[in-house]
Amino acid sequence: MPSVLVVGSANFYGRAVMQELCARRDQSSDTWTIRGVDKVLPELALFPQSVQQLYTTFDYRMGNLRSAEFLEQAFGDTQWDYVINIAEYKFGQTAGVYEQDVRHVSLEVARLAAKHKARSLVHVSTAHVFKPNSSANTPHGEDDAMEATNELAACHVQTEQDIQACEGRPPLVILRPALCYGPGDRQHVVPMLISAQISRATNQPMPILWDKDLRVSTVHVSDVARACVQSAQWIAHQGPKSHFVFNLADPGDTTNAKLAHAVAQLFDVKPSFQNSAFNFIAKRLKTSELTEEVNESLLGPWMELLAQHGIANSPLSPYIDAEHPYCRLEHCPLAINGSRIENTQGLDFKYQYSSVSADTLRPMIKEFQQLGLWPTIPI
């Protein structure tokens, strides 16, 4: 009778984790106890109808994740087998917001997992925490040096260290996803998708910043979800003080060019890589100055395109924050080695999405169109 508690169960990663858990529950003869907690009602989370229906099949509780009292109530009297913590974040927040939404919540979850004697704890961090290598395209392994290159990275680095040191914590897995995409994403690859849609509408090439050979490792959200569930089950049998860190990046060795071509193929446009002179100037701008230029060039056309298709309000935006890894790609290429989790004996994990492509991106647009958030242009 597996019992699973997911904190952050209605965010991008959390939705995929709940879908994975429910799929395993429905294929099992065992009775599963599944509880998800988050700060938003599923009806207001912009889920498709099928996903909203899924959330009625398990115990979902809404509340303030910053509240220690609410988290205590979420744990209840159950001795959970597996606790999965997905600390939600949005790029561009202040250090104080990250402190509350990432570090504070994560430490409270770890403390309660220890108190309630959970069999394992999985914490979803990020791969945007590594110190740049001397060779830009050398993939980072889990044991490489970390560096707080911005407020968000600093918070994740500190949170990982604090959870590991949490007294009495259960066996622990820390997962570090690379640039993640898939249904439900609104901030990782969506700005590039919007740029391509604008290029198609204006019959112009899609402008791509930075050198085409820079690495920008990717991972599909369904693989992140599977890693959460399988590592939670696996680590529970590895000893009371065990601790493992796994990067999550598909074996496709995604480059700037590969990602751009996948997006361009989806929208039937041509990518246009900036020349060396432009990139020479761009990388000498402050990151905030560069993002301001990019955002101003896309926001107006996107709003016009939405209006033309009768969409009065959409949470999707081409806005890209200075903390977004793509903005820092020239200085901090996101080259991640995600093979350790596949090579770990007994975990039995394999990436189902081996590389990013037009076909793996298309369901994102189809879902946005179904929800009335994206122009209904055939793709």
Image (cartoon, helix red, strand yellow):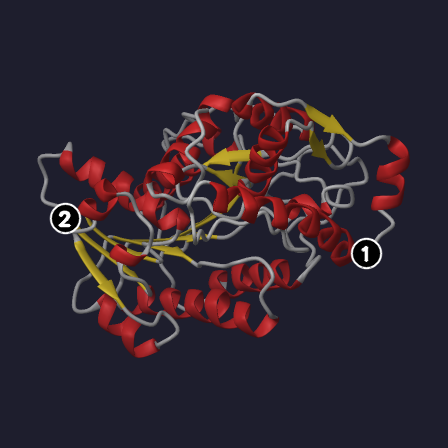
Q: Which residue is drawn at 69% across and 27% down?
A: 205
Residue situated in front as seen by the camera: 189 or 329: 189
Q: Is mark 2 on a helix, strand or loop?
A: loop
What's the amino acid at mark 2?
Thr
Mark 2 or mark 1: whose residue is earlier in sequence: 2
On residue 286, which mark appears? 1
Q: In which quarter of the image is residue 282?
A: top right
Q: For the residues marked 2 and 1, what is the alpha-carbon distance in whole angstroms?
A: 48 Å
The image shows residue 327, relative to residue 71, as above or below, that is: above
Q: Is residue 308 left or right of residue 293?
A: left
Q: Where residue 207 sits in the image (x, y, percent)? A: 71, 33
Q: Where residue 317 sits in the image (x, y, percent)? A: 54, 49
Please say whether residue 211 is visible from this viewpoint: yes
Please say whether residue 227 is visible from this viewpoint: no
Q: Is residue 190 left or right of residue 151?
A: left
Q: What element carries label 1?
A: loop
Q: Which residue is drawn at 23% across and 43% down?
A: 49
Q: How many marks?
A: 2
The image shows residue 8, relative to residue 162, as above or below, that is: above
User: How packed is label 1: few (under 14 Cα within 10 Å), some, or many (20 or more)?
Assistant: few
What's the amino acid at mark 1?
Lys
Q: Is residue 349 left or right of residue 137?
A: left
Q: Where residue 355 sits in the image (x, y, percent)? A: 52, 24
Q: Which residue position is annotated with label 2?
A: 57
The image shows residue 290, relative to residue 183, as above or below, that is: below
Q: In this view, does 377 lie to the left or right of 320?
A: left
User: How packed is label 2: few (under 14 Cα within 10 Å), some, or many (20 or more)?
Assistant: few
Q: Nearer the viewer, mark 2 or mark 1?
A: 1
Q: Where residue 114 sits in the image (x, y, percent)? A: 33, 66
Q: Which residue is drawn at 31% across and 62% down?
A: 40
On residue 121, which mark appears? none
